[in-house]
Amino acid sequence: MKNKNAAFIVLAIAMLQVISCAHWQKNKDLTVYIRQERENLSRSSVLVFNFLEPAYAEGMGAKVAEVFHLNLLGAQKFKIASLESHSNWNRITETEESRLLSAIEEGKSKNFDYILVGELVDFYHGGINPTRVKLKVRLIEARTRVTVFLAECSKQSQAKDPSFPMNTQLSNQAETPMKLAASIAKMMIEKL
C-alpha cells in the first residue's frame, strides 16, 4: 500500500511540473533586467536601429524596429523618435560590444540622446507548432554609453485546433509573429 501511495505522489508531482512548465511556456511575462530612473524622456530624442535577426527571419529585424518606432511615436515617450534603417551596426562578424559601440557612435554623431537596439531571438510562424516570438531590447544613453533599460519578452500563440495543420475553415489560425511582436513592443514601451 505504501508503494502505491508513494508512486501516486511521485506521479502527481511530475504531472504538476509538466502542467506548470506548459503554462509557463505558453506566454512568458516581460522581464526587465535594467530600468534606471532618468530625467523625463519626453524631452529627449531616440534613434531606433534595425533589430538583429536570425538567418531564417531575414528582413524581419527592420519590420520589428519599425513597429517599435511607431509605438514610441504613439506613446509620445520621446520628443523625437527616429528610425535608422540604413545602418550596418548589426554586423554579425563583430562582437556584441563593438556593434553596440558602433550604434552609440552613430547615434551621438546624429545628436540623439538615446539609441534603441534590439534582437529577434526567436521569430517563428507556426503551423502545427505555436507561433513564437522572443525579443530583447536595449535603450542606451549615447553620451554616457550607459544602458538605462534592458528587457526581454517572449510570447507564443497556438491555433485553436492544432490538429489541422493546413489553412482550413475548421480552425482559428495562430497569431502572426508580427502581431506578437507588436504586443511585446507595446508592453516594453510602457515600462520605459
Image (cartoon, grey):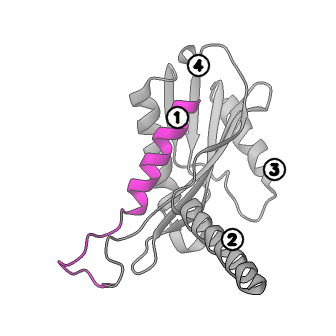
Determine the CA span between mark 2 and mark 3.
Answer: 47 Å
| Quarter location, residue 171 | bottom left
Please tell me which of labels 3 and 4 falls first in the chain: 4
Name the residue located 58 percent from the left edge and 29 percent from the top edge: 46
- Horizontal side of 43 relative to 75 (left or right) equals right
At mark 4, the secondary structure is helix
> Given this view, does label 1 or label 2 mark the residue nearer the observer?
2
Give the residue type that dot 3 points to. Answer: Ser
Labelled disc at residue 41: 4
Q: Which residues are magenta?
A: 164-192
In the image: residue 60, left or right of residue 55? left
- Give the alpha-carbon distance from disc 1 to disc 3, as whole Å: 26 Å
**Numbered tag placed on residue 98 in the rendering:** 3
Q: Is residue 178 magenta?
A: yes
Q: In whole angstroms, how far apart are the C-alphas of marks 2 and 4?
A: 48 Å
The residue located at (57%, 63%) in the rendering is 25
At x 51%, y 62%, the residue is 26
Q: Amino acid under label 2?
A: Ile
The amino acid pointed to by label 1 is Ile
The circle on residue 101 is: none
Disc 2 versus disc 4: nearer the observer:
2
Q: Position of residue 102 (x, y in %)?
A: 74, 44
- Which residue is situated farthest in the left direction here? 169
Taking depth in this image into account, of 127 and 53 the one nearest to the observer is 127
| Residue indicated by mark 1 | 189
First in residue order: circle 2 vs circle 4: 2
Q: Nearer the viewer, mark 2 or mark 3?
A: 2
Graded by Cα atoms within 10 Å as few (under 14), some (14 to 19) or many (20 or more), the crowding at tag 3 reads: few
- Residue type at the position of mark 4: Leu
